[in-house]
Image (tube, rainbow, N blue to C red):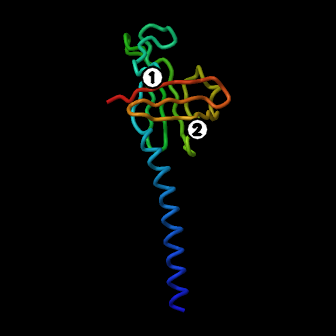
Amino acid sequence: MKKKFYQTSIVVLFVLTIISCGIQKSSTAKNALIGTWQICNSDGVVEQNLYGNKDQIRYKIISTDKFTLIDLNSRYNKVLNSFVGSYTIDKNIYKEHILFTNSNFNNLLKDTYSYKYKVKDDLLTIEGIGNPYIETWKRVQ
């Protein structure tokens, strides 16, 4: 009886260890994304004229369960566009679900966008799944 209890205890501890390592790995991936990011080119040079628009910059702020994307005109201190939503991570797939936006983008509400992502040093690269969308972001210190 003691031997069976001991064997069962070992198996339970082994399973709990595997589960906790999986949870920790997912949590570590999420922690790598948390922070403030500014869009840049693939070399890490921050974009000052986003999409050819003078003085337009873009930030993405990622918390533990929400993201905010905001386009700004740095010259006139003006908010141009903004998106707020939730996100999930599954392996190397980052999914954004838009919950709030300004009226120019109401058609995007409730949409979900999926990206493959990679964090290396202070750069985050996302690549759209099912579309050619690729962006690089630099962590803001």
- At 35% across and 28% down in the image, what residue appears? 140
Residue linked to disc 2: 95
Secondary structure found at label 1: strand
**Which mark, residue 56?**
none
Give the quarter of the figure containing the C terminus.
top left
Identify residue type, mark 1.
Ile
Q: Is residue 37 left or right of residue 15?
A: left
Residue linked to disc 1: 39
Mark nearer the N terminus (1 vs 2): 1
Q: Residues within 10 Å of mark 2 (few under 14, many from 20)?
A: some
Q: Nearer the viewer, residue 40 or 83?
A: 40
Q: Residues within 10 Å of mark 1 (few under 14, many from 20)?
A: many
Q: How many marks?
A: 2
Asked if residue 76 is positioned above or below residue 59 in the image, the reply reads: above
- At 64% across and 33% down in the image, what residue appears? 111
- At 43% across and 32% down in the image, what residue appears? 61
Q: Nearer the viewer, residue 34 or 13?
A: 13
Identify residue type, mark 2.
Lys
What's the distance in space between the residues labelled 1 and 2, CA to CA? 18 Å
- At 46% across and 54% down in the image, what residue appears? 24
Secondary structure found at label 2: strand
Give the quarter of the figure containing the N terminus.
bottom right
